[in-house]
Image: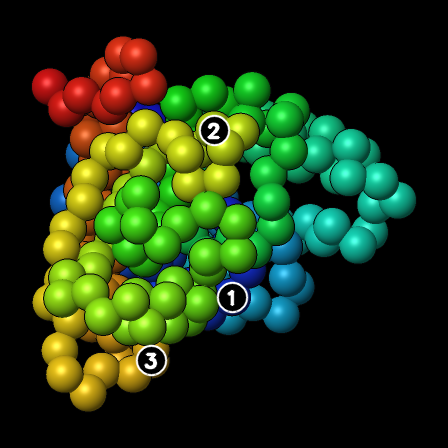
Protein backbone atom coordinates (compact mmCIF):
# COMPACT_ATOMS: atom_id res chain seq x y z
CA UNK A 1 0.00 0.00 0.00
CA UNK A 2 1.58 3.26 -1.16
CA UNK A 3 1.49 6.41 0.98
CA UNK A 4 0.01 9.41 -0.85
CA UNK A 5 0.79 12.93 0.39
CA UNK A 6 -1.39 15.69 -1.09
CA UNK A 7 -0.21 19.34 -1.24
CA UNK A 8 -2.93 22.00 -1.19
CA UNK A 9 -3.40 25.75 -0.82
CA UNK A 10 -7.12 26.44 -1.19
CA UNK A 11 -10.58 24.93 -1.24
CA UNK A 12 -9.43 21.43 -2.02
CA UNK A 13 -11.94 20.33 -4.66
CA UNK A 14 -9.39 18.04 -6.30
CA UNK A 15 -8.46 16.71 -2.85
CA UNK A 16 -12.15 15.94 -2.31
CA UNK A 17 -12.23 14.06 -5.62
CA UNK A 18 -9.29 11.96 -4.40
CA UNK A 19 -10.93 11.36 -1.00
CA UNK A 20 -14.21 10.34 -2.69
CA UNK A 21 -12.33 7.97 -5.01
CA UNK A 22 -10.46 6.49 -2.05
CA UNK A 23 -13.70 6.01 -0.09
CA UNK A 24 -15.20 4.27 -3.16
CA UNK A 25 -12.15 1.97 -3.44
CA UNK A 26 -11.26 3.47 -6.83
CA UNK A 27 -7.64 4.07 -5.78
CA UNK A 28 -5.96 0.70 -5.77
CA UNK A 29 -2.92 -0.01 -3.57
CA UNK A 30 -2.69 3.57 -2.26
CA UNK A 31 -3.98 5.67 0.60
CA UNK A 32 -3.87 9.40 1.41
CA UNK A 33 -1.85 9.53 4.61
CA UNK A 34 -1.26 13.29 4.91
CA UNK A 35 -2.43 16.62 3.50
CA UNK A 36 0.13 19.44 3.60
CA UNK A 37 -1.09 23.00 3.10
CA UNK A 38 0.83 26.14 2.24
CA UNK A 39 -2.06 28.14 3.71
CA UNK A 40 -3.21 27.64 7.33
CA UNK A 41 -6.72 28.79 6.41
CA UNK A 42 -7.21 26.47 3.43
CA UNK A 43 -10.60 24.74 3.49
CA UNK A 44 -8.80 21.67 2.13
CA UNK A 45 -7.49 21.11 5.68
CA UNK A 46 -11.09 20.77 6.90
CA UNK A 47 -11.80 18.22 4.17
CA UNK A 48 -8.81 16.19 5.36
CA UNK A 49 -9.79 16.40 9.05
CA UNK A 50 -13.37 15.37 8.21
CA UNK A 51 -11.91 12.18 6.75
CA UNK A 52 -9.41 11.52 9.56
CA UNK A 53 -6.41 12.35 7.40
CA UNK A 54 -3.30 13.79 9.07
CA UNK A 55 -2.59 17.46 8.22
CA UNK A 56 0.46 19.74 8.27
CA UNK A 57 0.98 23.42 7.42
CA UNK A 58 4.19 24.83 5.95
CA UNK A 59 4.28 28.46 4.79
CA UNK A 60 6.86 29.88 2.42
CA UNK A 61 6.80 33.17 4.36
CA UNK A 62 8.04 31.46 7.53
CA UNK A 63 11.47 30.89 5.92
CA UNK A 64 14.06 33.55 5.16
CA UNK A 65 15.20 31.96 1.90
CA UNK A 66 13.56 29.75 -0.71
CA UNK A 67 16.36 27.23 -0.21
CA UNK A 68 15.46 26.84 3.47
CA UNK A 69 11.81 26.38 2.58
CA UNK A 70 12.67 23.85 -0.15
CA UNK A 71 14.71 21.79 2.32
CA UNK A 72 12.03 21.97 5.03
CA UNK A 73 9.28 20.87 2.64
CA UNK A 74 11.44 18.01 1.35
CA UNK A 75 12.13 16.83 4.89
CA UNK A 76 8.46 17.13 5.86
CA UNK A 77 7.36 15.00 2.89
CA UNK A 78 10.10 12.45 3.64
CA UNK A 79 8.97 12.28 7.28
CA UNK A 80 5.55 11.15 6.02
CA UNK A 81 7.15 8.25 4.11
CA UNK A 82 5.54 9.48 0.90
CA UNK A 83 5.60 7.18 -2.12
CA UNK A 84 3.60 9.67 -4.21
CA UNK A 85 3.13 13.44 -3.90
CA UNK A 86 0.02 14.95 -5.49
CA UNK A 87 -0.28 18.70 -6.14
CA UNK A 88 -3.96 19.58 -5.82
CA UNK A 89 -4.05 23.35 -6.20
CA UNK A 90 -0.71 23.94 -4.45
CA UNK A 91 0.18 27.56 -5.19
CA UNK A 92 3.87 27.59 -4.17
CA UNK A 93 6.53 26.70 -6.73
CA UNK A 94 8.41 23.52 -5.88
CA UNK A 95 12.18 23.72 -5.55
CA UNK A 96 14.99 21.57 -6.87
CA UNK A 97 15.37 19.54 -3.65
CA UNK A 98 11.76 18.32 -3.62
CA UNK A 99 11.65 17.64 -7.35
CA UNK A 100 14.95 15.74 -7.41
CA UNK A 101 14.07 13.73 -4.28
CA UNK A 102 10.76 12.64 -5.83
CA UNK A 103 11.58 12.34 -9.52
CA UNK A 104 8.56 10.93 -11.42
CA UNK A 105 6.75 10.64 -8.09
CA UNK A 106 5.09 14.08 -8.03
CA UNK A 107 1.81 14.39 -9.96
CA UNK A 108 0.08 17.66 -10.87
CA UNK A 109 -3.28 18.42 -12.46
CA UNK A 110 -3.37 21.30 -14.97
CA UNK A 111 -6.70 22.74 -16.24
CA UNK A 112 -5.85 22.68 -19.96
CA UNK A 113 -4.59 20.28 -22.62
CA UNK A 114 -0.81 20.67 -22.34
CA UNK A 115 1.09 22.05 -24.29
CA UNK A 116 -1.71 24.60 -24.72
CA UNK A 117 -2.20 27.31 -22.08
CA UNK A 118 0.50 26.10 -19.71
CA UNK A 119 3.75 27.28 -18.18
CA UNK A 120 4.53 30.32 -16.08
CA UNK A 121 1.50 32.49 -15.30
CA UNK A 122 -1.04 29.94 -16.47
CA UNK A 123 -2.91 28.94 -13.33
CA UNK A 124 -6.47 29.14 -12.04
CA UNK A 125 -8.85 31.30 -14.05
CA UNK A 126 -5.95 32.72 -16.14
CA UNK A 127 -5.87 29.42 -18.04
CA UNK A 128 -9.56 29.57 -18.94
CA UNK A 129 -9.42 33.27 -19.79
CA UNK A 130 -6.62 32.53 -22.28
CA UNK A 131 -8.51 29.56 -23.78
CA UNK A 132 -11.66 31.64 -24.31
CA UNK A 133 -9.68 34.57 -25.75
CA UNK A 134 -8.13 32.20 -28.28
CA UNK A 135 -11.56 30.82 -29.20
CA UNK A 136 -10.65 27.14 -28.81
CA UNK A 137 -13.51 24.67 -29.20
CA UNK A 138 -11.95 22.08 -26.88
CA UNK A 139 -10.08 22.51 -23.64
CA UNK A 140 -9.71 20.04 -20.79
CA UNK A 141 -7.27 18.84 -18.17
CA UNK A 142 -3.88 17.14 -18.03
CA UNK A 143 -2.32 15.03 -15.29
CA UNK A 144 1.47 15.06 -15.54
CA UNK A 145 4.60 14.34 -13.56
CA UNK A 146 6.39 17.40 -12.21
CA UNK A 147 9.92 18.27 -13.29
CA UNK A 148 12.02 21.45 -13.23
CA UNK A 149 10.16 22.90 -16.24
CA UNK A 150 6.81 24.48 -15.34
CA UNK A 151 4.07 22.12 -16.65
CA UNK A 152 6.80 20.35 -18.65
CA UNK A 153 6.87 16.89 -17.06
CA UNK A 154 5.73 13.64 -18.72
CA UNK A 155 1.99 13.61 -19.50
CA UNK A 156 0.11 10.76 -17.82
CA UNK A 157 -3.53 11.37 -18.81
CA UNK A 158 -5.59 13.98 -20.64
CA UNK A 159 -9.31 14.51 -21.09
CA UNK A 160 -10.95 16.95 -23.48
CA UNK A 161 -13.97 19.09 -22.58
CA UNK A 162 -16.16 21.05 -24.99
CA UNK A 163 -16.02 24.84 -24.88
CA UNK A 164 -19.52 26.26 -25.39
CA UNK A 165 -20.85 29.56 -26.70
CA UNK A 166 -21.33 32.04 -23.88
CA UNK A 167 -18.84 30.36 -21.56
CA UNK A 168 -17.21 32.55 -18.94
CA UNK A 169 -13.88 31.57 -17.36
CA UNK A 170 -15.80 30.52 -14.22
CA UNK A 171 -18.30 28.35 -16.13
CA UNK A 172 -15.54 26.69 -18.17
CA UNK A 173 -13.47 26.11 -15.03
CA UNK A 174 -16.39 24.34 -13.34
CA UNK A 175 -17.11 22.16 -16.40
CA UNK A 176 -13.44 21.13 -16.73
CA UNK A 177 -13.28 20.27 -13.03
CA UNK A 178 -16.44 18.16 -13.15
CA UNK A 179 -15.90 16.48 -16.53
CA UNK A 180 -12.11 16.08 -16.53
CA UNK A 181 -10.04 16.96 -13.44
CA UNK A 182 -12.08 15.05 -10.86
CA UNK A 183 -12.10 11.99 -13.14
CA UNK A 184 -8.54 11.67 -14.44
CA UNK A 185 -6.65 12.74 -11.29
CA UNK A 186 -7.89 9.78 -9.18
CA UNK A 187 -7.35 7.44 -12.16
CA UNK A 188 -3.76 8.59 -12.61
CA UNK A 189 -3.07 8.27 -8.87
CA UNK A 190 -4.43 4.72 -8.92
CA UNK A 191 -2.33 3.81 -11.97
CA UNK A 192 0.79 5.07 -10.18
CA UNK A 193 -0.03 3.12 -7.02
CA UNK A 194 -0.57 -0.01 -9.11
CA UNK A 195 2.90 0.47 -10.71
CA UNK A 196 1.30 0.82 -14.14
CA UNK A 197 3.15 3.97 -15.27
CA UNK A 198 6.62 3.83 -16.78
CA UNK A 199 8.62 6.88 -17.90
CA UNK A 200 10.94 6.45 -20.89
CA UNK A 201 12.66 9.46 -22.53
CA UNK A 202 10.32 11.91 -20.74
CA UNK A 203 7.25 10.06 -22.03
CA UNK A 204 4.88 8.37 -19.59
CA UNK A 205 3.68 4.99 -20.79
CA UNK A 206 0.67 3.33 -19.17
CA UNK A 207 1.14 -0.42 -19.04
- Tell me: 92 left or right of 86: right
| SS of the residue under disc 2 | loop
How far apart marks 2 and 3 lie (CA) works out to 29 Å
Using a 10 Å C-alpha cutoff, classify the residue at mark 2 as few (fewer than 14 neighbours), some (14 to 19) or many (20 or more).
many
* Label 1 crowd bin: few (<14), some (14–19), many (20+), radius 10 Å: many
Which residue, given by chain and number where applicable, does mark 2 sit on? 147
What residue is shown at x 60% (from left), y 45% (from top)?
A: 93
Q: Position of residue 55 (x, y in %)?
A: 56, 51
Give the quarter of the figure containing the N terminus.
top left
Residue annotated with mark 1:
10
Rendered view: 42 above or below 63: below
Whether pointer 2 and pointer 3 mark residues with C-beta atoms closer than 8 Å, the reply is: no
Examine the rendering and report whether any part of residue 72 can be seen: no
Answer whether labels 1 and 2 touch (C-beta < 8 Å): no
Q: Nearer the viewer, mark 1 or mark 2?
A: 2
Query: Can you tell which mark lies on residue 170?
Result: 3
Of discs 1 and 3, which sits in the foreground?
Answer: 3
Amino acid sequence: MKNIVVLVSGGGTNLQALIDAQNSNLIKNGRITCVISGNPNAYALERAKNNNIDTEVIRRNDFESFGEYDLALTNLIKSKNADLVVLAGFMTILGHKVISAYENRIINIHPALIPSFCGEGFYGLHVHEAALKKGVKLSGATVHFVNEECDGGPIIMQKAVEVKNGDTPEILQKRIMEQAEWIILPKAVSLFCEDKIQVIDNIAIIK
